[in-house]
Amino acid sequence: MIDFTKTPGWLDWYQGPSKPQFKLPAGAIDSHCHVFGPSDVFPYSPERKYTPCDASKAQLFALRDHLGFAKNIVVQATCHGADNRALVDALTHSDGKARGVATVKRDVSDAEIQRLHDAGVRGVRFNFVKRLVDFTPKDELMEIAGRIAKWGWHVVIYFEAVDLPELWDFFSALPTTVVVDHMGRPDVSKPVDGPEFELFIKFMTEHENVWSKVTCPERLTLTGPAALNGERDAYHDVVPFAKRLVETFPDRVIWGTDWPHPNLKDHMPDDGLLVDFIPLIAATAALQQRLLVDNPSRLYWPEEIKNGA
Ligand code: 0GY
């Protein structure tokens, strides 16, 4: 049996998350979360850069119900490489309440893309975070993007803010809707109107096909979960960044928990507290409805909108 001992220092997800005070709108979608293994059924990739704790579909669906979400978007994590079996297993056992984002390689067949589509996959993820993946040539990624576009899928991109200038032209040439993970990972110790975040705002302004996940305050924060005003007002250094995106691009933002929060070293967030971050960045019911229901539905369940469901 292969040894899948967790990476030293790996933090397990928060046990017994609190009930959020914020009441999610009906049909709210957690648009960024993962399943890990279980490794005895779905082994981790030999190419992985970390070994997580197992985090099963049943545990994810229990969290969904506890927090009050209606649906999940399960995103393929790098520890599973381009082996999408755990993802597909979660989607096909979700009673139609989960769709997903896969990782594929250049040699993926049309039959495999169709199989993933039938299971509920609606996007591919390109990861440029160097601590997570080995380099993939851009022509290979562009070829994949061109192929999956025919299925109406989008491309999810994950990169660090400092790398945006170098990646700008490649991202601009992508032929699909493009969804940026975690606001392009800004350094939140820099001003929200400073050159780094302004570049990201410019990127979204100039490219109407680009969306952003306003996710991961727990990953971006320097002040941590310490409260500012009231005990559930956490991660306040990230609020101005997410709020600016929500208010500037209300139809191109989505939100997710990022459960089970891979690679956090300092603290593991209470997922209930994370949900209470939402009204801090989307202050009105109209913005919350778009962020949590309307926008992710357009990306992941467009047929329900067409049918008026
Ligand atoms: C996230 C963030 C991280 C990891 C991955 O696929 C992954 O391994 O996305 C990270 O370490 O920043 O979105 O889960």
Image (spheres, rainbow, N blue to C red):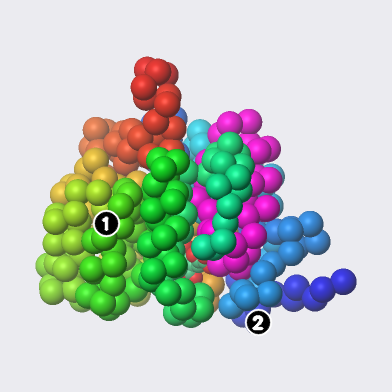
Q: Residue at x 65, y 82 (%)?
A: 8
Asked whether mark 2 lies closer than 8 Å to ligand 1, one says no
* Magenta segment includes 96: yes
Looking at the rendered structure, the secondary structure element under dot 2 is loop
- Residue occupied by mark 2: 8
Q: Residues within 10 Å of mark 2 (few under 14, many from 20)?
A: few
| Residue 112 shows in this picture | yes
Q: Position of residue 100 (x, y in %)?
A: 52, 46
| Residue 274 shows in this picture | no
- On the picture, is 275 further left or further right than 114? left
Q: Residue at x 33, y 68 (%)?
A: 185
**Mark sitting earlier along the chain (2/1):** 2
Of 33 and 90, nearer the camera is 90
Asked whether mark 1 lies closer than 8 Å to ligand 1, one says no
Residues in magenta, as a range:
76-104
- Residue occupied by mark 1: 242
- On the picture, is 305 further left or further right than 122? left
Of 257 and 49, nearer the camera is 49
